[in-house]
Amino acid sequence: MKVGTGLAQGRQPLPELAAQAVRQALDQAGLDIATGVLLFLSEDFAQDPQPALRAAATAASTTQVSGCSAPGIFTQDEWVLDGSAAAALVLGDGAAIAMARDQKDGVLLTLTAPNAFNASWMESPGIRFGGVAGDATGQGQFSLWGNGKVLTGHCDLALEGAAGVVDVAHPFKPVGVPQRIDQASGHDLLVLSNQSASRQSAWSSLANALSAQGIEHQAGIPCHHMMLMLAESEAALSRGDCQLIPIVGANADTQSVTLAKEAVPGDWLAWGLLDRDAAQRHLASKIASMGARLRNEPTFGLMFSCLARGPHFYDGVDHDLALLKRYYPGMPVIGFYGNGEIAPVNGRNALWQHSVVLGLFTAES
């Protein structure tokens, strides 16, 4: 299997940028033609990406061009935010990227528009990983494509001739002790308890956890810096097999905490606080465990990062990408910064925020 990446940027969203990125990728892979192209374009291409798709298809000598637009794109060599750019990954010599024919088998690379995401599709057969096109609000311009044509909704792509593993790393450190949900009403957490059987209101639990971290909250709980880490058991929570649930608000008068999904008594939780060191530790552990699960060194990587992460999170440097490169120097990598990441947890597909979804692939044996 031969793989290469390329990235081209300019002052305007011209189709030639897509062709340049593909030609760079072909040169890196040692290919004259590609059997599949994954093409990510900056969001200023979104209104009319078809000319760029034709240019990429011509340069690669294939119509198998898939991808989407995003506010930021990257390869292993560089990243681009707020500029016109095209990033391409090409496959050849026994590997290809094509629209999935059978969603029951293998791992599916999934790209979706913000308005196409829904629970019934996510729960249909197939293990999915990928990202949501569009800006952090989901309101900006976005588009996606497969087989060299613009699509609506979402697309599932098969990585033919490749086998790999996928995982997700979040940037939250648990604060306070794991607790069980004792009482809840719809989206409102009311009463929690821990192993010592002591009970307290959800608001008090959250406030005490923040106070223990030295975080002032008299003016309000900093919900934008937090997530609820939710699992079906305390053991699953300790392993990190959890969902991340946005915290909508906290009410001192009712002693409740409101979540973005319904709370279920019996589940276990920990309050999660955004933390750069925790983000790096979690990603490092995931990269190491993924490598151990592969039969051979990975040939290429696909990475999908939250727009609120990457350079925005690390003061102008994408330390997540740099960490992956330390583990696998020179490995072709392509990805984008979007407004949601898709990866399975406990065998079920889930939408993540503030996270990095990573896929590592090698030739199928």
Image (spheres, rainbow, N blue to C red):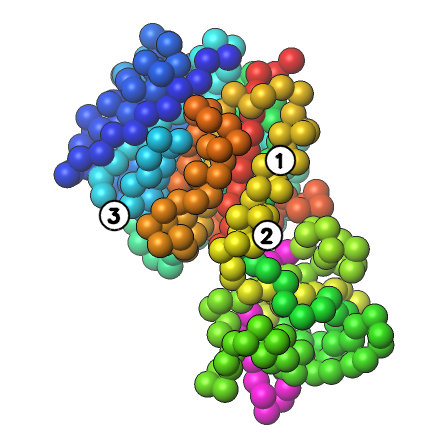
Residue at 44 percent of width and 18 percent of height:
3
Discs 3, 2 touching: Cβ within 8 Å:
no
What is the CA distance from the residue labelled 3 to the residue labelled 2? 31 Å
Q: Main secondary structure of the magenta part?
A: strand
Note whether 36 is above or below 68 in the view shown. above
Tell whether 32 sits left or right of 247.
Answer: left
Residue 64 colored magenta? no
Could you tell me residue 305's position as x and y percent? 45, 45
Give whichever of 290, 244 is nearer the camera.
Answer: 290
In primary-sequence order, the first of circles 1 and 2 is: 2
Discs 3, 1 touching: Cβ within 8 Å:
no
Q: What is the number of the mark on residue 288?
A: 1
Q: State whether residue 104 appears in this view.
A: yes
Residue on which the image places disc 2? 119
Could you tell me residue 198's position as x and y percent? 81, 80
Discs 1, 2 touching: Cβ within 8 Å:
no
Note whether 36 is above or below 138 in the view shown. above
| Quadrant housing residue 10 | top left
Note whether 225 is above or below 361 in the view shown. below
> What's under tag 2, amino acid-wise?
Ala
> What's under tag 3, amino acid-wise?
Asp
3 or 2: mark nearer the eye = 3
Give whichever of 200, 146 is nearer the camera.
Answer: 200
In primary-sequence order, the first of circles 3 and 2 is: 3
Residue 256 colored magenta? yes
Q: How many neighbours does mark 2 have within 10 angstroms: few (below 14), some (14-19), or many (20 or more)? A: few
Q: What is the number of the mark on residue 82?
A: 3
Magenta span covers which residues? 243-257
> What's under tag 1, amino acid-wise?
Ala
